[in-house]
Image (tube, rainbow, N blue to C red):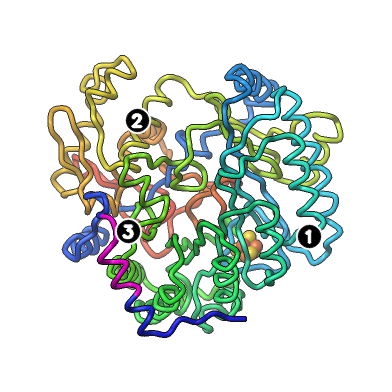
Amino acid sequence: MVTTVPHFAREAAAEVARDTAPPAAAHSVIRRGDLADFRALAERIDVNGPRYTSYPTADRFHTGFGEDAYLAALDDCRAAGAGAPLSLYLHIPFCENICYYCGCNKIITRDHGRSARYVRYLAREMALVAARLGERRPVVQSHWGGGTPTFLDPTEMRQVMAALHRHFDLRPDGEHSIEIDPRRVDDERMALLAELGFNRVSLGVQDFDPEVQAAIHRVQPVEDTRRVVAASRRLGFLSTSMDLIYGLPHQTAARFGATIDRVLEMRPDRLSLYSYAHLPHVFKPQRRIDEAAMPSAGEKLDILVSAIERLTAAGYVYIGMDHFALPDDALARAQREGRLQRNFQGYATHAGHDQLGFGISAIGAVAGRYVQNARTLDEYYGALDAGRLPVLRGHVSDADDRLRKDVIGALMCHGELDTAEVAWRHGIDFDARFAAERAELASLAEQGLVRISDERIDVTPLGRLLVRRVAMVFDRYLRDERAAAAQPGSDRVPDSKSEPASDPVSGPALNPVSDPASQRPAAHPLRRMPPISRSGAAPTARYSRVV
Ligand code: SF4
């Protein structure tokens, strides 16, 4: 049964929500003037860059990090004690149909026999990791992404969940989420998800416009989405989120506005609004997208600005970077209370715990190391058949990485940086250590993105809309790359790209936790713009796109 709410009731509810909503964090309030400034500035500067779901970003991981390094990380994780909570990520790569915009690490197949084998190997991987950890550790956050996790049939889902419970203590009061393709989930499956302990669902939507859907090969009747949202509410899921993508063929501000209006009728607790970056040389399915039908860079900005206006006018809080939430959602509460954190899923309320990744291309963060699994089924199965963990690459964070991760996290999550506190915590002289960064920040301050005082850096509301530009100032890897490229005789093009998993298209289309490709996306054909720099120098950069 489809639950529909009369229009007048929705409006009344929205009014009530606006009247009774707790105040948003000051820096998260986006005013019309900020959007106008953003629109103007984004036309002039390069606003592309990493999403910093990790620091360093996944493209910095290297194959010098192998199984031994991961085992050492697990040993350190074990030493943290049996009670130390964990996060888990599971990657289920299978999909029945290809969406043309997709940049995920997925396997298109209708042969459900393939997932049965995958489930067995997932359980093997969990057993190996859990044996190294020694204890059945508590898990306060878990997320199944893909691909399409609900490609698994009910029996397979039960098997995966049984394996998880065998090796880990999934806390019922934790956050347990799953990505859902509304076209593939009926009421019975939603009931199964609730029974299995999921309490949050994330729905891939992208756009409700039939012409857009046809152009991206993802025909998804609005009724499917309504039905899943209604089931999620009926079954008591704590949070329902939706992913939208702007920049797709045939989109205009008005047409995307109609999609937003339909989304607002369903009033999901959270919304992600991702930018589509057209990188057909990296992601083959994108070659089937008609470039002539894509919005221009200016139109894309209009779509984004108009969507932000609509969402904030409807009471959504701008969390940051692509994310919106209702004021009483846990994410908005975490932001108000200064508890917001950043992890591979984007913004999170639970972060700071070690995160284990299972399945092909899954990324984990364990005891100061990042680790990523093999990308293909053959490599993944081969390693596990040999009794090895299927490690592809990783990174061991040093003190500088930890310092910069803290700085970037504070800017992206809280919009402020207490430089004295950072200096004290990391035992550094902030001004001396970040002299070059401070000089570059002065340029951003002139453009209204930050306010700088002796012991503070505050990101303005305008800066929140361009926060990755602020964060990039503190990315040592980008700085080193630019410096190397600027050396006399260097013919290198500075390649200041984001983690490829997180940007060309994100969310269900491209899951940050399962980096689909290590290729570095080249500049979007629609625009090549110079990054902001104090000197005004404009090296050609290859960023993934924000707009
Ligand atoms: S966008 Fe999602 S559902 Fe579509 S092909 Fe990619 S992973 Fe599969």
Frontmost residue, 228 versus 249: 228
Q: Does residue 19 show up magenta in the picture?
A: yes
Frontmost residue, 14 versus 220: 14
Question: Which secondary structure is most common in the magenta stretch?
Answer: helix
Q: Amino acid at mark 1?
A: Pro
Q: Which residue is disc 2 drawn over?
A: 487
Q: CA distance from mark 3 to mark 1?
A: 36 Å
* Residue extending farthest top: 427
Q: Which residues are magenta?
A: 13-22
Look at the numbered discs 3 and 1 and tell me whether their residues touch, using CB distance below 8 Å: no
Residue 77 position within the rendered picture, expressed as x and y whole percent measured from the top left:
60, 22
What is the number of the mark on residue 154? 1
**Disc 3 crowd, CA 10 A, few/some/many (<14, 14-19, 20+):** many
Residue 414 position within the rendered picture, expressed as x and y whole percent measured from the top left:
30, 41
Q: Amino acid at mark 2?
A: Gln
Residue 506 versus residue 70 in the image, above or below: below
Of callouts 3 and 2, which one flags the residue occurring earlier in the amino acid sequence?
3
Q: Does residue 318 show up magenta in the picture?
A: no
Label 3 SS: strand
Frontmost residue, 514 versus 318: 318
Visible in this render: residue 471? yes
Residue depicted at x 68% and y 22%: 71
- Going by the image, does 206 lie left or right of 254? right
Q: Which residue is disc 3 drawn over?
A: 317
Of callouts 2 and 1, which one flags the residue occurring earlier in the amino acid sequence?
1
Look at the numbered discs 3 and 2 and tell me whether their residues touch, using CB distance below 8 Å: no
Task: Quarter of the image for the C terminus: give it.
Answer: bottom left
